[in-house]
Image (cartoon, rainbow, N blue to C red):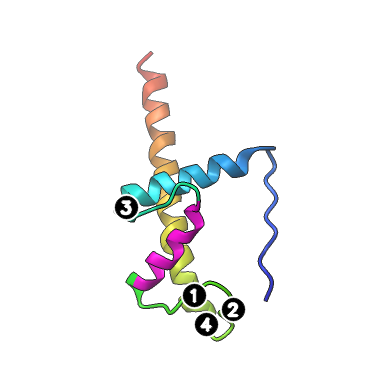
Amino acid sequence: MSRRNRKYAVPGAERGMQAFKAEVMRQEGYDVDPNRPDDVKYEVAKELGVPLEPGGNGDLTTESVGQVGGKIGGSMVREMIRLAQQQMVDKESK
């Protein structure tokens, strides 16, 4: 199966999203290489007991791979919501 080709609506957003992912996962306690933030998925997979490896993972179920992506994406979404709520509070207090 080929890797999805994600296209961001805002030019240059990919770099910012990768930096955001690295920061969020660092806050979650993971050791993240800022130059390779996608590699944190292997650490998450190991923690969850999912045998995710670089290269082919065709033998993994959608459910097990979804656990890894869900943990990362869920953490990112929670942080985005927290930041948006903080911005709203800050805006109201001005």
Q: Is disc 4 placed on a helix, strand or loop?
A: loop
Of the image marks 1 and 3, the number of the one nearer the N terminus: 3
Give the magenta range. Answer: 36-46
The residue to which callout 2 is attached is 56
Q: Give the spatial CA distance, label 2 vs label 3.
A: 27 Å
Q: Going 58% across and 74% down the picture, which residue do you hit?
A: 55
The residue to which callout 1 is attached is 53
Q: Is residue 82 left or right of residue 65?
A: left
> Which residue extends farthest top?
94
Residue 18 is inside the magenta segment: no
Give yes or no for contact between labels 1 and 2 (Cβ–Cβ under 8 Å): yes
User: Which mark's residue is nearer the viewer, 4 or 2?
Assistant: 2
Up-down: is 58 above or below 42?
A: below
User: Which mark's residue is nearer the viewer, 1 or 3?
Assistant: 1
Up-down: is 81 above or below 33?
A: above
Residue type, numbered disc 2 = Gly
Q: Give the spatial CA distance, label 4 vs label 2.
A: 13 Å
Q: Give the spatial CA distance, label 1 vs label 2.
A: 7 Å
Count residues near mark 4 (Cα–Cα under 10 Å), then give few for <14, some for 14-19, many for 20+.
Answer: few
Residue type, numbered disc 4 = Thr
Residue type, numbered disc 1 = Glu
Of the image marks 4 and 2, the number of the one nearer the N terminus: 2
The residue to which callout 4 is attached is 61
Count residues near mark 2 (Cα–Cα under 10 Å), then give few for <14, some for 14-19, many for 20+.
Answer: few
> Which residue extends farthest left?
29
Q: Is residue 54 left or right of residue 43?
A: right
User: Which mark's residue is nearer the viewer, 4 or 1?
Assistant: 1
The residue to which callout 3 is attached is 28
Of the image marks 2 and 3, the number of the one nearer the N terminus: 3
